[in-house]
Amino acid sequence: MVLDPEAFMVTMEKRISFSEADKAILQANLAWGKSIAKEMADVFYTYLARDNEMNAILTAKEGRMHRLNETFIEWFGEMFSGMDNWGSAYAARRWRIGLVHVQIGIGPQHVVPAMATVVNEVGQQLKKAGLPDDVREALGRICMIDLAFIEQAYVEVSSQAVLKETGWTEGLFKRMIATGAAGMK
Ligand code: HEM
């Protein structure tokens, strides 16, 4: 494995200032999070299904939508519980979610707006429930950490696949990307 999920988690926590206070507030609101998880899943998959390309992915396999509803509800709850206090189990689970999306061919263009939908909908739900801003802020931070895992998986898997297939060194690959980017208009 190229990326160490636990180390990546620690880096992201520091980078986005996901604090002990954020963790405490999420855990304190776990019951509320669970109570809205089903509605969140409905909004999320209605959003994905509006897009032809994403809808085709969602309906490509028998039972996929059903599984997705369940896994989304679980995922949503885990942001509040933190599983093992946002430790190695949490990080490994987030990395795995990233890998699953790479395997299916879901890229940043799909995932970023999808996470924005989650953040927006959570904001609406918080307002409806009259919950304070610090819950929204904590949730916003953990959503961005989860998003970083999915996006990073995409980059790590693509570059590792190229390196393995070609035998290039990482240094050469990075130089080629830099040169390619410089040559693009
Ligand atoms: C906020 C972004 C997203 C989150 C949090 C999320 C969450 C998840 C989770 C938790 C799983 C289960 C992973 C596992 O089996 O271990 C999953 C799988 C999957 N997701 Fe997402 N997802 C996101 C974005 C998307 C998007 C944009 C699509 C586009 C269609 C998508 C389609 C799928 C599909 C097809 C699977 C595999 C389902 C199966 O056959 O079991 N997801 N997702």
Image (tube, grey):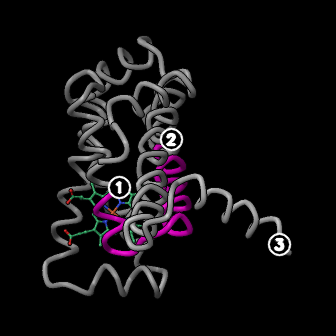
Residue at disc 2, CB closer than 8 Å to ligand 1: no
Tell me which segment is drawn in magenta.
Answer: 98-122
Residue 98 numbered tag: 1
Residue 41 numbered tag: none
Tell me, yes or no, whether the two marked residues, 2 and 3, touch with CB atoms within 8 Å. no
- Considering only vertical position in the picture, is 130 above or below 75? above
Residue indicated by mark 2: 144
Magenta highlight on residue 10:
no
Element type where label 1 sits in the image: helix
Tell me, yes or no, whether the two marked residues, 1 and 3, touch with CB atoms within 8 Å. no
- Considering only vertical position in the picture, is 48 above or below 157? below
Q: Main secondary structure of the magenta part?
A: helix
**Residue depicted at x 34% and y 82%:** 57
Q: What is the x, y in percent for residue 8?
A: 42, 34
Return the disc, 1 or 3, that comes first in the chain's sequence: 1
In whole angstroms, how far apart are the C-alphas of marks 2 and 3?
31 Å
**Residue depicted at x 45% and y 43%:** 125
Looking at the image, how many numbered discs can be counted on the residues?
3
Q: Quadrant of residue 71?
A: bottom left
Magenta highlight on residue 114:
yes
Ligand 1 quadrant?
Answer: bottom left
| 88 and 147: which is toward the camera | 88
Residue 183 numbered tag: 3
Q: Quadrant of residue 30?
A: top left
- Given the image, on which type of amino acid does mark 1 rest? Gly
In whole angstroms, how far apart are the C-alphas of marks 1 and 3?
30 Å
Q: What is the x, y in percent for residue 77?
A: 25, 39
Residue at disc 1, CB closer than 8 Å to ligand 1: no
Return the disc, 1 or 2, that comes first in the chain's sequence: 1
Element type where label 3 sits in the image: helix
- Considering only vertical position in the picture, is 54 above or below 67? below
